[in-house]
Image (cartoon, helix red, strand yellow):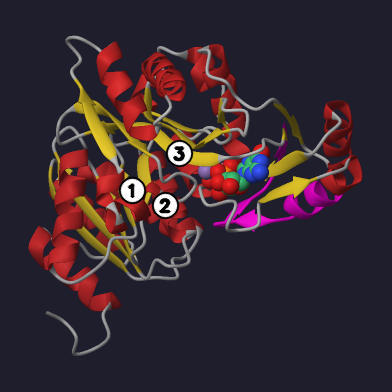
Amino acid sequence: MNIHEYQAKEILRRFGIPVAPGDVARTAVEAEGIAARYGGAVVVKAQVHAGGRGKAGGVTLARTPAEARAAAERILGMTIKGLPVGAVLVARAADIASEAYVGIIVDRASKRAVVMVSPAGGIDIEEVAATTPDRIRRLPVDPRYGFLPFEALQLGTFLYRDAGQARAAARILRQLYDAFLDSGASLAEINPLVTTPAGELLAVDAKMVIDDNELERRPAVAALRDASAEAPSEVAAREANLTFIRLEGNVGCVVNGAGLAMATMDLVKYYGGEPANFLDIGGSSNPDKVIAAIRIISSDPKVRVILFNIFGGITRTDDVANGIVTAVRHAPLRVPLVIRLTGTNEEAAVRILENAGLSAMTDMDAAVQRAVALVAPAGSAR
Ligand code: GDP
Ligand code: MN
């Protein structure tokens, strides 16, 4: 789950990290009021679940309340990376002497939280990693001992020559680590962490991503969800209890079980196709889930074929077939459907589909090849 910058900053503040003061506005008039209250210059910042807002024009410096109002007016009408801006953060503008990057991610390879720092902040850390990898320091944290003070100080010293600033950075890193663990985050970053001309450290931006599996035991964190800022397909999938992740390709996939979903995506890629999504309808065979899955996938204009891959164990394939038939009756599909199902009640499923003018295959390999062939230009099949 993504949370907004202003929410991440509230968390960091609670853990003692120095953060530029700010407030959220949903209208330009509110933004003007906040700027008037702060007095001096402010930054008006789009609150969307996307990075690179600065480059997209979603971060604007305003010297007066009237400028803040005009900036908010413009930014509140923007769409950044497909996401409409519903709110802006109006923060007291910081004077910036230098910009660093500090962040913590869950690293699946080392199975640890990895703290990353770079004195080259402000820009994408991926870009720094690609062009000047020696400007990044990474530290995997051993969960048996936690993030130790001397480790934090080593990273602080990599960031700043000044001993006081290095110590301040070390303190911030350990506070960030505590916030990361406490929130069940998979990512927590401050980019940029700035120094002011007076030598103080200050978090000017903050981003946190919360691991969905950590939400159930953290109702206060779960309450930070802003469904209005999420992609409608992802909201619909969550409401239907489907595990759904949108991808870039055009082969829509409906599969039962995460392992089979991964294998299906691998096979789509193997035959030269690109999956449009990961979608796991789960182990039960509620036809409503199938209907919701088809609706969600069909709403993606990129999708050119829908591939069902159902292995019936606990899942009854006749229930899935009924779901498909109901969904197609309700709203005829604008793309071809390739259905592979095998296992529990397979004969009944095939009968149900055939009675509705649909057909099913039992071989996964053949079904994936057919789906990929349907989206590939003629003659380009592998
Ligand atoms: P992002 O582009 O979505 O990462 O948004 P940021 O909050 O990181 O803002 C982008 C850039 O705007 C930063 O790297 C800063 O250079 C600049 N910026 C943001 N806040 C301030 C501020 O308070 N004062 C000044 N002078 N620049 C700021
Ligand atoms: Mn940033």
Check if residue 89 falls in the magenta segment.
yes
Q: Residue furthest front?
A: 162
Q: Is residue 322 magenta?
A: no
Q: Quadrant of the C terminus?
A: bottom left
Q: Amino acid at mark 2?
A: Thr
Q: Residues within 10 Å of mark 2 (few under 14, many from 20)?
A: some
The residue indicated by pointer 3 is 100
What type is the residue that disc 3 sits on? Ala
Image quadrant containing the N terminus? top left
Residue at image coords 29%, 76%: 375
Q: How many marks?
A: 3
> What numbered label is drawn on residue 322?
1
Q: Where in the figure is residue 63, as x and y percent of width and height?
A: 83, 44
Q: Is residue 97 left or right of residue 369?
A: right
Residue of label 2:
326
Q: Is residue 298 above or below residue 116?
A: below
Relative to 270, residue 95 above or below: above
Foreground disc of the pair 3, 2: 3
Identify the magenta region: 70-91
